[in-house]
Image (tube, rainbow, N blue to C red):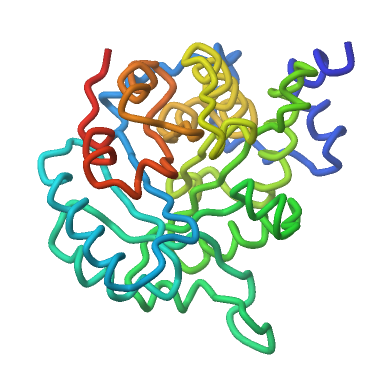
Amino acid sequence: KVVAALLLAAPMVSAFTGFAAPALRTGASVRQASGISTLSMAERRPFIAGNWKMNPETLEEAKVMAKAIADTAGSSKAQVALMVPHPFMYSVGKILEGTNVEVGAQSVYFEAKGAFTGAVSTCMIKSMGATHALSGHSERRVIFKNDDDAINKKTRKLLDEGLCPMLCIGESQDENGMGITSAVCATQLSKDLRGVTAEEMKKVTIAYEPVWAIGTGLTCAPEQAQDTCAFIRGWVAKMYDQNTADNIRILYGGSVTPDTVDELMGKPDIDGCLVGGASLDAAKFGRIINFESK
């Protein structure tokens, strides 16, 4: 009952997370969000992003892979970005110049400079040509212990730098089994977007990645992915306004393959995919980039 109340009432979400929800803009729509976007995906440009993670092993491999992916993306109607390891960003960016593929970072630190050994700042990645960066990927949350406060600071810093954050949220396998996926997503959204205005949300992309489906070969059913993405859009409508919800792009990530992409992209609230392992194979990623909506 507590979880149900949390999902149905925005004030309860704020109480649960400990953070105040963003206020609706003046004149914003306050109609009850249905969770189904009033815009079709055709009106929101599809977005396919590849996350190379800690791959490949050498710069030369990265350059060859980037060139092969750029060659497959030329005819795609989607916006395409590659989130590459920091040491490869500049060289890969040069390979991608003049193509349909942008370069982004997998993570940043929220300070501009200083005694933070091993950290990479937003101004550094911007100087190397990055336009996007992931914020809150589950591997950063779980392995590197990034909490929601740090993720909020990263998201805020990316926006302040004029970059486009891709905020990653999603539930663990245990949380999925407990039936609290929406509650977990609402909590993460409320904390991670604290202080982000409706105007700034124009630069934000949200990626729903069920943790149990990342790198496991498991993909949640397209209907389940759609339901969660629709919930996220409804949350944005309640916390901001319907126009913001209609225009924000929501991606699905979690073992996306050429065999699953078409059905996923046919769902009304799934505007793209964040692709892990398959983005390391130019042929597979090329098929995903050039998806066919069902």
Instruction: Decide if residue 9 is on the left or right side of residue 63.
Output: right
Instruction: Decide if residue 251 is on the left or right side of residue 155.
Output: left
Residue shown at 43% from the left, 73% from the top: 125
Residue 217 or 39: which is nearer the viewer?
A: 217
Image quadrant holding the C terminus, namely top left
Report x, y in % for residue 108. 56, 67
To which quarter of the image does residue 67 belong? bottom left
Report x, y in % for residue 169. 62, 39
Image quadrant holding the N terminus, namely top right
Residue 212 or 187: which is nearer the viewer?
A: 212
To which quarter of the image does residue 187 belong? top right
Residue shown at 30% from the left, 20% from the top: 262
In this rendering, the answer to whether 177 lies above or below 100 is: above
In this rendering, the answer to whether 279 lies above or below 224 is: below
Residue 1 or 208: which is nearer the viewer?
A: 208
Report x, y in % for residue 57. 41, 67
